[in-house]
């Protein structure tokens, strides 16, 4: 067992020598069904079972769990006894990510504490990490409670799985010497519990609820951030508007002042024009009067000339 891409099918192909065992490209999950392979080694017949990995690219962990549970119950009812489980983990993973940790916890619930003596925690992908790096990660796995520490204390062994058939087979022969044991989920299902009532399924639901909770927290975080952004951007907008308004107001004020000045100048000008006009009219009136006086005077003189016979011709 193990997460998708941990190297389960590769291990099985190597030990069985069966080219029919399909291996993934490394990007997408490959094994979709529980599949049992038989082979003989050192006079013993082994039945090795390939399983779909958790964290599948196509199916939820719940669906993978159902696939495993169906097979495990049926094999139990058929009298098949399990000598052991190899749980694979990539040593090349830079850290035990959320999904890998979730699946390990679910695996523990699936097995139950009593089964731990029949578990090998196998680390793969040693060929792509430096020895120091690999050893440092292995040490961390062994020292961390939620990783391998408790499982090891409960009887599991931690082994490096290398691309070497002989050492892989040696590992399997250690299983052959072990007392088969019933897994917790087999017992639970056999006793009549539904899958959702089993410890492993509850773990999946709890993990799911936890995941949802984390996502909700993240979402509300994002919302708060977004709100902050909105508030900040709104503030910036308000500030910009305020500044624009201030500039606008001062422009309006300047324009009004200019307009007032122009109006006053205009009034001044109009007043001057009016005065000028009045003066001109008065002057004209005076001129008219003077002209009239002169005209009257001339007319008078003309009449006097006409009336005086002695002075004519
Ligand atoms: N470098 C390296 N590659 C490996 C090792 N084990 C497996 N691979 C590669 O990893 C990819 C996935 O391997 P699989 O054996 O299909 O993995 P799986 O655990 O069966 O994956 P699922 O079937 O999807 O659950 C393939 O490309 C393998 O060749 C390893 O120890 N070292
Ligand atoms: Mg596979």
Image (spheres, grey):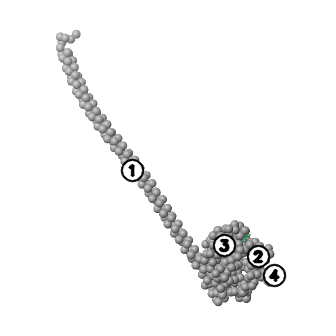
* Up/down of 198 relative to 124, above or below: below
Can you tell which of label 1 and label 3 is closer to the viewer?
A: 3
Look at 44% across and 57% down and name the residue there: 238
Name the residue that disc number 1 marks: 249
Q: Residue 195: where, in percent of width, then height? A: 63, 83
CA gap between label 1 and label 2 equals: 86 Å
CA gap between label 4 and label 2 equals: 14 Å
Q: Residue 62: where, in percent of width, then height? A: 64, 78
Q: Determine whether label 1 and label 3 are within 8 Å by CB.
A: no
Check the picture and name the quadrant holding the N terminus.
Answer: bottom right
Closer to the chain start, of discs 4 and 1, is 4
Viewer can see residue 102: no
Image-based side of 141 in relation to 308, left or right: right
Name the residue that disc number 4 marks: 42
Q: Secondary structure at mark 3?
A: helix
Closer to the chain start, of discs 1 and 3, is 3
Tell me where residue 78 sits by quadrant.
bottom right
Q: Residue 216: where, in percent of width, then height? A: 54, 71
Name the residue that disc number 3 marks: 138
In the picture, the disc for residue 306 is none
Can you tell which of label 4 and label 3 is closer to the viewer?
A: 3
Look at 72% across and 68% down and name the residue there: 127
Q: Secondary structure at mark 1?
A: helix
Closer to the chain start, of discs 4 and 2, is 4
Image-based side of 78 in relation to 216, left or right: right
In the image, the residue with mark 3 has its CB under 8 Å from the nearest atom of ligand 1:
no
Comparing 19 with 165, the one in front is 165
Name the residue that disc number 2 marks: 167
In the image, the residue with mark 1 has its CB under 8 Å from the nearest atom of ligand 1:
no
Q: Residue 72: where, in percent of width, then height? A: 69, 84
CA gap between label 4 and label 1 equals: 97 Å
Tell me where residue 115 sits by quadrant.
bottom right
């Amino acid at each position: 067992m193990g997460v998708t891409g941990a190297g389960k099918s590769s291990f099985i192909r190597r030990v069985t020598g069966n080219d029919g065992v399909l291996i993934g490209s490394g990007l997408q999950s490959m094994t979709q069904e529980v599949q049992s392979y038989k082979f003989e080694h050192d006079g013993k017949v082994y039945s090795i079972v390939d399983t779909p990995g958790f964290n599948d690219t196509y199916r939820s962990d719940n669906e993978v769990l159902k696939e495993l549970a169906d097979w495990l119950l049926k094999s139990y009812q058929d009298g098949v006894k399990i000598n052991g489980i190899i749980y694979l983990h990539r040593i090349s993973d830079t850290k035990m990510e959320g999904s890998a940790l979730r699946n390990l916890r679910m695996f523990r619930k699936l097995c139950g504490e009593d089964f731990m003596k029949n578990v090998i925690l196998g680390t793969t992908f040693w060929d792509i990490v430096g020895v120091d790096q690999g050893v440092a990660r292995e040490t961390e796995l062994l020292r961390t409670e939620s990783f391998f520490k408790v499982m090891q204390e409960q009887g599991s062994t931690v082994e490096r799985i290398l691309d070497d058939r002989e050492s892989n087979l040696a590992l399997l022969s250690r299983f052959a010497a072990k007392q088969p044991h019933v897994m917790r989920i087999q017992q639970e299902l056999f006793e009549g519990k539904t899958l959702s009532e089993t410890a492993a399924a509850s773990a999946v639901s709890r993990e799911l609820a936890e995941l949802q909770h984390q996502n909700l927290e993240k979402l509300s975080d994002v919302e708060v951030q977004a709100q902050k952004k909105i508030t900040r951007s709104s503030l910036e907008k308000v500030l910009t508007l305020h500044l624009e308004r201030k500039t606008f107001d001062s422009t309006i004020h300047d324009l009004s002042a200019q307009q007032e000045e122009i109006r006053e100048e205009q009034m001044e000008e109009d007043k001057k024009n009016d005065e000028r006009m009045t003066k001109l009219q008065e002057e004209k009136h005076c001129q008219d009067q003077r002209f009239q006086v002169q005209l009257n005077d001339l007319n008078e003189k003309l009449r006097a000339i006409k009336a005086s016979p002695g002075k004519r011709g």
